[in-house]
Image: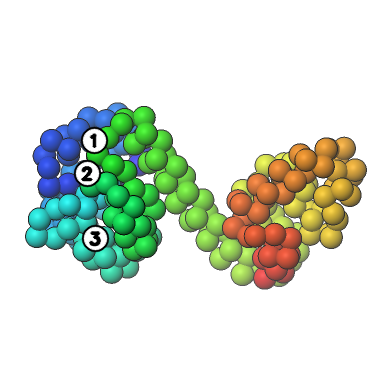
Amino acid sequence: MAKIMVIDDDRTHLDMAGAMLGRCYDVTPAASGAGALEMLCSGEAPDLILLDIDMPDMDGFETFERIRDMPAYAEIPVIFLTGMTGSETELAGLRLGAQDYITKPFVRDNLLARIRLRLESSRQAVQLRDMRERMRHTDREDERFAVLTRVLSPAEQEVAQLILKGCSNQEIAAALNYSPGYVKNLATSVYGKLGVHGRAELRGLFRG
């Protein structure tokens, strides 16, 4: 079960978040930024943090920066929570590096969907980083391809292999008996899963 830390000075919002998330996640509440930092220093890292912006003494922005200064927690996804409206507040949080922004009061389905999305994105980022690290330690092309395509579906693996051979989408479609549109969608999925932006970056990733 994924661990979610909720940082909010409003006990009502802490209780509400706990009630909404408790069936799906292991929820740890913190009533202040300072309290959250103390918990992080002494406890197990959460998988995601929900962080209120408008808190006394240490607001969410400062709390976020203090968390990012802790190497063990530098990459934990953070979703800002706020009762304030306006694009300036939202942009300020996103510029700091938060992954998302949710306005209070919470809508349960929206909150759960945002959390699932950010947890999945974080999982994929870790998976991609591990894959790139493994690729650095092998020179055999078959092993490199096996590592490279582990996160891909069988159809995506076929398309990736033909892209690496220099085939165009039309040539791949003819070879696999797929429509060109389907090949384009598969190629886009390959690039997204492997964290590259096109054929050249894919070949560069494969070659190391």
Q: Identify which amino acid the numbered label 1 is placed on.
A: Pro
Mark 1 to mark 2 CA distance (whole Å): 7 Å
Label pair 3/2, CB-CB below 8 angstroms = no
Q: Helix or strand or loop: what does disc 2 sit on?
A: loop
- Label whose residue precedes the other's in the sequence (3 or 2): 3
Q: Are marks 1 and 2 in contact (CB under 8 Å)?
A: yes
> Is residue 199 something one can see in this rendering?
yes
Real-space Cα distance between discs 1 and 3? 19 Å
Residue that label 3 marks: 61
Determine which residue is flagged by label 2. Answer: 83
Q: Can residue 206 be seen in this view?
A: no
Which residue is at a point 48% across and 56% down the rendered structure image? 126
Q: Viewer-nearest of labels 3 and 2? A: 2
Towards the viewer: 149 or 96: 96
Q: Which of 208 and 65 is in front in this view?
A: 65
Residue 166 image-quadrant placement: bottom right
Identified at 27% across, 30% down, the residue is: 20
